[in-house]
Image (cartoon, helix red, strand yellow):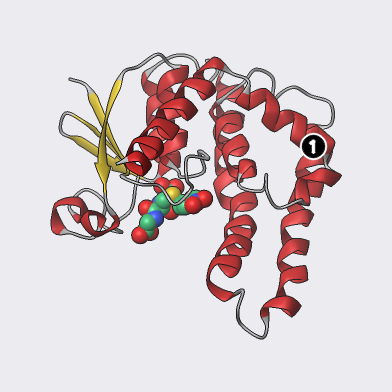
Amino acid sequence: MTVTITAFEQSPDRGRGLARDMRVRWALEEVGQPYDVHLLSFAAMKKQAHLSLHPFGQIPTYEDGDLVLFESGAIVLHIAEQHAGLLPNEVGARARAIMWMFAAVGTVEPPIVERSAAYLMERDKPWYAERLPMLDGRVCAQLDRLSRHLGDAEWLDGAFSAGDLMMVHVLRRLESSGLLQDYPNLVAYIARGEARPAYKQAFADQLAVFEAASAG
Ligand SMILES: N[C@@H](CCC(=O)N[C@@H](CSCc1ccc([N+](=O)[O-])cc1)C(=O)NCC(=O)O)C(=O)O
């Protein structure tokens, strides 16, 4: 039975690989698993057929036979548990890799999403100019700490893992913000993730969807 994921029919990330189906695509490529994609319009995401898969009406979802999952982190963890290549076998290293998955989505991502949401929904509000430095400050506080931890290491904890996959994708959202320029080791870290063949394949496949939709 082939796995099926959901993704945007026409992603607002305009093919930049920022939507969260990218994490699932990348994970499936890292473990060498084929998958089908069910593309959804914004309207279809809020209809009952999709809400029965994803109670919050979002993408991505993951279907494998009777199993239906949502939450990109949970999907990546499931893929990593089912196939070799994204989690170490050694108990402690495996636990730390999962720890970094949670750190990505639970500690580093929230201020990045808050900053992005403010730009998208509040940039014309009178308080935005005053609020932006605070939003940047919260993002940079986490970048500072992550950068110090990473130092000159290639990955967060030994070999590349699902923790790095999630963290690289979280950080990519900042690529056009200018905030990463003060953290050259994080820029290089992201570039190492983007240089992986599995990432490149996932990115190309996500971009192809956007280009086909834009051409149509
Ligand atoms: N915590 C969930 C969050 C899922 C989520 O936010 N999904 C978004 C798409 S990825 C988030 C996203 C969207 C757009 C960009 N972008 O750069 O344009 C980046 C990321 C979605 O379905 N949004 C539609 C809706 O909520 O109605 C997860 O990790 O799976």
In terms of depth relative to the viewer, which is nearer, 182 or 64? 182
Q: Outermost residue, front direction?
A: 215
The part of the image, by quadrant, that contains residue 72 is top left
Q: Is residue 37 left or right of residue 176?
A: left
**Residue 198 position within the rendered picture, expressed as x and y whole percent measured from the top left:** 50, 19
State left or right for residue 127 relative to residue 3: right
Residue 156 in sight? no
Q: Position of residue 12 (x, y in %)?
A: 44, 52
83 with respect to 167 (left or right): left
**Which image quarter holds the N terminus?**
top left
Residue 115, percent across and down? Answer: 63, 63
Res. 159 image quadrant? top right
For label 1, the residue is 149
Q: Residue reaching furthest bottom?
A: 126
Residue at 20% in and 51% down: 50
Q: Is residue 64 left or right of residue 18?
A: left
Q: Position of residue 20 (x, y in %)?
A: 45, 43
Among the 4 quarters of the image, the one containing residue 60: top left
The residue positioned 14% from the left and 58% from the top of the image is 48
Q: Identify the residue shown where x is 78% and y is 69%.
A: 133
